[in-house]
Amino acid sequence: MISVVMPSYNSAAFVAEAIESVIRQTYPHWELLVCDDGSSDGTQDIVESYARADSRIRLLQHGFRSVSRNCNAAIAAARYPWIARLDADDVMVPRRLEWQMRASERDPAVVLWGGYARLTNREGRILRTAWCGPTTHAEYESQREAGRMMVILGPTVMFRRDLFLELGGYDPRFDSAEDLEFLSRIAERGPVLTLPRALTLYRLHGGSITAGKAAHQARLLQYIPLRNQARLAHRPEERLEEFLHKLDAAPVWSRAAEWLSGRSRQHYRNAVIHAAESRFAKAAAAVTLAVLMGPGFCLPRINARLARSIRWRQGALARRVARIWPQRPAVTAEAED
């Protein structure tokens, strides 16, 4: 049995498609909790119409203005032992819950399952496939022993509710990185693995991320592996507030570098969003600014994207050629004679 938790905020343009994707699951034993954080665009009316038609769907209305607190309240209200996360602008593939439940039955030691995702634009056009996270126990152990921050795509995860509650849920201090921070804690309780399947259509859309938010998120992502390494070495771990205070008290040149890094991340993310929504001139301008302000952050990512694009185009060309000129069976010497 699975409780699907879907946080929403002004998601009227997409929430119906997200709910429909849960209704269409081949695994029937689920409930859906849409936890709305004070929408003003009709999102709640859409969800209520589905809830009236299907008793497995519930609308929870909150006003936290915090994704962590919003999801914590929904998971506390959930009835079932597994929690599957889905955002209100994303879509589950029809067999997602079935595949994840089968995996949990085959390997009950695993405490969190994730998967790959198809990145789409606002209209649902598939852009590429994103994948990350360990797919084997050996990969999980290697990452854990190194103290690295594990990354599994948030809208694909399914995890044990009892451990979530025992660990205190998402930490609101980490809003914008709350899923990765929780992942690092639950990974201490058992293996976390990624299924090598696309489980979710992950929509890229929306406005610009602010430089301040990008810089703060980068700070949080620095802290998580440092905490992991301290715990593994049984050293006293630095509190988040102490870590942030130390960054604030750093020399001017260090704070300037951090400011540039935040700006670079901001412009890079905005470039991705602009490109997904076919605003190519804005995308080019944003990526230029991103490279100028943070080449060390941007250039490896741009190179990786170009390499993926080239491989995809080569594969598409090979498939097209194979359709036009099917390979003839080899002719043996005996047949020629």
Image (cartoon, rainbow, N blue to C red):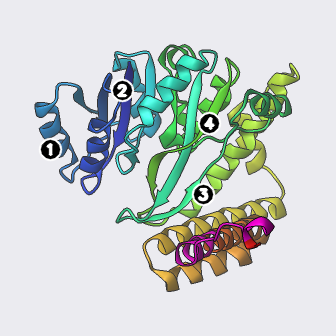
Q: Residue at x 11, y 32 (%)?
A: 52
Question: Mark 3 or mark 1, which is nearer to you?
Answer: 1
Q: As shown in the figure, which amino acid type bears the numbered disc 2?
A: Ala
Q: What element carries label 4?
A: strand
Q: Is mark 1 on a helix, strand or loop?
A: helix
Residue at numbered disc 4:
194
Residue at numbered disc 3:
214
In the image, residue 336 sits, relative to residue 132, either above or below, namely below
Measuring from the top left, give residue 83's x and y in whole percent.
44, 25
Q: What element carries label 2?
A: helix
Give the alpha-carbon distance from disc 2 to disc 3, as whole Å. 27 Å
Residue at numbered disc 2:
74
Give the alpha-carbon distance from disc 3 to disc 4, as whole Å. 26 Å
Question: Mark 1 or mark 4, which is nearer to you?
Answer: 4
User: Image quarter for residue 224?
Assistant: top right
Q: As shown in the figure, which amino acid type bears the numbered disc 3?
A: Ala
Give the alpha-carbon distance from disc 2 to disc 1, as whole Å. 18 Å
- Tag on residue 45? 1
The mark nearer the N terminus, 3 or 1, is 1
Residue 314 on the magenta span: no
Q: What element carries label 3?
A: helix
